Amino acid sequence: MRGRSARAVKQRLESLALAGVTILPKPTGTTGAATVDRPEPTASTPAAGSGGSHVQVGAGGDGGRALDLIRAEVAECRRCEALACARRNTVFGSGSPAARLCFLGEAPGADEDASGLPFVGRAGQLLTKIIEACTLSRDEVYILNVLKCRPPDNRQPLPEEVANCREYFERQLLAIGPEFICCLGTTAAQALLETAEPIGRLRGRWFTHGRAQVICTYHPSYLLRNPGAKRHVWDDMQLLMARMGVGP
Ligand code: URA
């Protein structure tokens, strides 16, 4: 995404500070990239492992490096043993590590489990249309789910599964530092906002999560079953586009 505003840069710096990165040496050379010391590992930011103890900052490399580390942990995760036994792939997320906007879904379905990519089935194709109707592309936003493994028969995630995966989606969001998060459906909205309010009451309103502004809307799977709800999603996308300063 071109022309990130000063506000976006400030927000990224604040996200890094939240992640424990407090020192940003002056860039050297011509790439604009700088190297910073990684924060001490904590429960939510474990040791970097074989990748060394530095994180690349600048030219979009910071979020991507952090995401790679989290992705590797997720690939090994067995916190939900039943889901780990049944999965073909973990489904981590896709898109730009420097995205201004993240879409948070519920959990992988059969197509996502088979491919390892989020939102590639029928609901995913509808999500792509929604993103493109907002004059954005899948490559410039970031798409992730609350759960990284497919629940059997696509049942709703259990509370303990959401609790097990919370660390991963929270760290993904911290690494990306988006200005906006759009929660798709009840599971995503309730998990992110830590509320029991139904999606019908959460949609169309603004919330915050850390530094990000959050909007909730209906899940694309719900729209496939209830096409009449598309107009509400479009209303929500209009609110989102207006705040983002994008749109037709
Ligand atoms: N539904 C979701 O919530 N996520 C996906 O990745 C696919 C369908």
Image: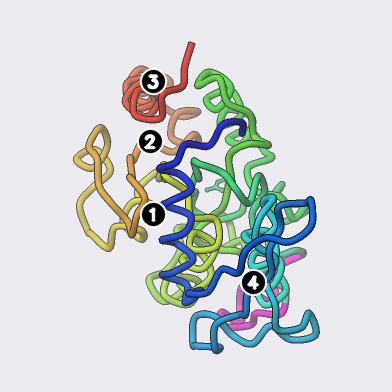
Type of the residue with mark 1: Thr
Q: Mark 1: is the Cβ under 8 angstroms from ligand 1?
A: yes
Type of the residue with mark 4: Ile
User: How far apart are the two marked residues, 2 and 1, measured between alpha carbons?
Assistant: 10 Å
User: How far apart are the two marked residues, 3 and 2, measured between alpha carbons?
Assistant: 10 Å
Q: Which residue is mark 2?
A: 218
Q: Which residue is mark 4?
A: 70
Q: Nearer the viewer, residue 188 or 122?
A: 188
Q: Which residue is mark 3?
A: 234
Vertical arrangement, residue 44 with respect to residue 28, above or below: below
79 falls in the magenta region: yes
Residue 202 percent coordinates (x, y): 23, 42
Type of the residue with mark 2: Tyr
User: How far apart are the two marked residues, 1 and 3, measured between alpha carbons?
Assistant: 20 Å
189 falls in the magenta region: no
Tags 1 and 3 in contact by the CB under 8 Å rule?
Answer: no
Q: Quick one: label 4, few (<14), some, or many (20+) residues within 10 Å? A: many
Point out the tag, 3 or 2, that comes first from the N-terminus: 2
Q: Which residue is mark 1?
A: 187
Identity of the residue drawn at 64% across and 34% down: 138
Point out the tag, 3 or 4, that comes first from the N-terminus: 4
Q: Nearer the viewer, residue 202 or 41?
A: 41
Q: Nearer the viewer, mark 1 or mark 4?
A: 4
SS of the residue at dot 4? Answer: helix
Q: Quick one: label 1, few (<14), some, or many (20+) residues within 10 Å? A: many
Q: Nearer the viewer, mark 1 or mark 3?
A: 3
Residue 236 percent coordinates (x, y): 33, 27
Q: Is residue 53 left or right of residue 159?
A: right
